[in-house]
Image: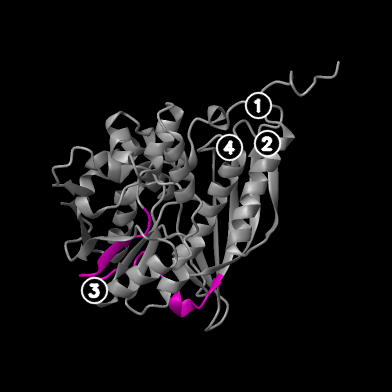
Amino acid sequence: MTISPSTAPTPPRLTSLSHGGGCGCKIAPALLRDILQQHLPLAAPPELLVGSETADDAAVWRLSDSQALVATTDFFMPIVDDPEDFGAIAATNAISDIYAMGARPLLALAIVGMPVGVLPAQTIGAILRGGQQACARAGIPVAGGHSIDSVEPIYGLAVIGIADPRRIRRNRDARDGDRLVLGKPLGVGIYSAALKKDLLDASGYRAMVDATTRLNIPGPLLAEIDGVHAITDVTGFGLLGHALELCRGAGLGACLRAQAVPLLPGVRELAAAGAVTGASRRNWDSYVDEVDLRCADPLAQTLFTDPQTSGGLLVSCAAEALPRVLEVFAATGFADAAEIGSMRAAPRRLVVE
């Protein structure tokens, strides 16, 4: 019997097929450190300028004095139900790691795991199409990839970029007195939790997609500024987790001003209503001993541990470079970029005032 389109089974919601979504799928920071510490470090060749030693955003391999390859991979399960939006968000998030190193992307390879007996081919095709569209906006091709039949839907990219090795911006080179600038507002994880609870309205959904599909193109432009010392992007470990990576890498502390941190519209109200991810709690448990929450905001812990999918760049720059950094963000469509704090000499301690 042929099933007509009107009687064909409705495909399941993408988010119903996964136990977590977006960068909220990440392994908790503390558990990840425990796992990685079980591996013996191998002698790195001199061409490997950046490896896994400081949890940086991508690996960097020097080809010559003026060229280096930058390589990364990122993938996750659905954060939204629209397949094209999911594909575009996942691809944008993966490409961000290249921008966060101060590099320019060259090409991508697709990573695809789909429950082929559950999702129709049209839905899977729409996910890939969304990823291809994000890559096209970045000016790169999807040059290949690999696919498997998976219990949960998974999509992402391996991305190759290129940079001048003298302009690579790592997460370990922040300096005492540097100003910290955040490129995108926080709240994606809270939006995601609200979506699952049917608390997110149409304007909130659009704000979520707009934020997560906005390519972090200021990265290589910021790397050309001499006073920019370190760049990373804020993703699954939340603002506090990725700020701590800057602190650990440089052997410094930092102070964040809670009132200066930009938030997506309605995020505070949604968090107060209970739209909080499990990843937020895991993040806090992983680095609570390194954070001093001094601000009076009762939602500070929730907001600043919130996992960001395709979040903004976090830039550590000299005070004299700050106006130029904010100018670059504004000129490339990041009007919400804001100075949110500074690096301090106190070792590896993060204070939120």
* Residue 305 spot, x, y in % from top left: 31, 43
Residue contact at pointers 2 and 3, CB within 8 angstroms: no
Query: Height in image: 200 above or below 22?
Result: above
On screen, residue 280 versus residue 98, left or right, reads left
Query: Please, what secondary structure does the residue beneath circle 2 have?
Result: helix
Alpha carbon distance from label 1 to label 3:
53 Å
Label 2 to label 1: alpha-carbon separation: 8 Å
Give me the C-alpha separation between circle 2 and circle 3.
48 Å
Q: Residue at left 67%, top 61%?
A: 141
Q: Which residue is mark 4?
A: 82
Question: Sequence order check: which comes first, mark 3 or mark 4?
Answer: 4
Q: Residue furthest top?
A: 1
Q: Earlier in the sequence, mark 4 or mark 1?
A: 1
Disc 3: CA contacts within 10 A as few (<14), some (14-19) or many (>=20) = some
* Front residue of 66 and 40: 66
Percent across and percent down for residue 184 are 38, 55
Determine which residue is flagged by label 3: 319
Residue position marked by numbered label 2 in the rendering: 123
| Kind of residue sitting beneath label 4 | Asp
Q: Which residues are magenta?
A: 162-184
Asked if residue 89 is among those painted magenta in the image, a careful observer would answer: no
- The quadrant in which residue 114 appears is top right
Measure the alpha-carbon separation of dots 4 and 1.
11 Å
Q: CA distance from mark 2 to mark 4?
A: 9 Å
Q: Earlier in the sequence, mark 2 or mark 3?
A: 2
Going by the image, does 278 lie left or right of 339?
right
Q: Is residue 146 shown left or right of residue 37? A: right
Q: Which amino acid type is marked by label 2?
A: Thr
The residue at which mark 1 appears reads as 11
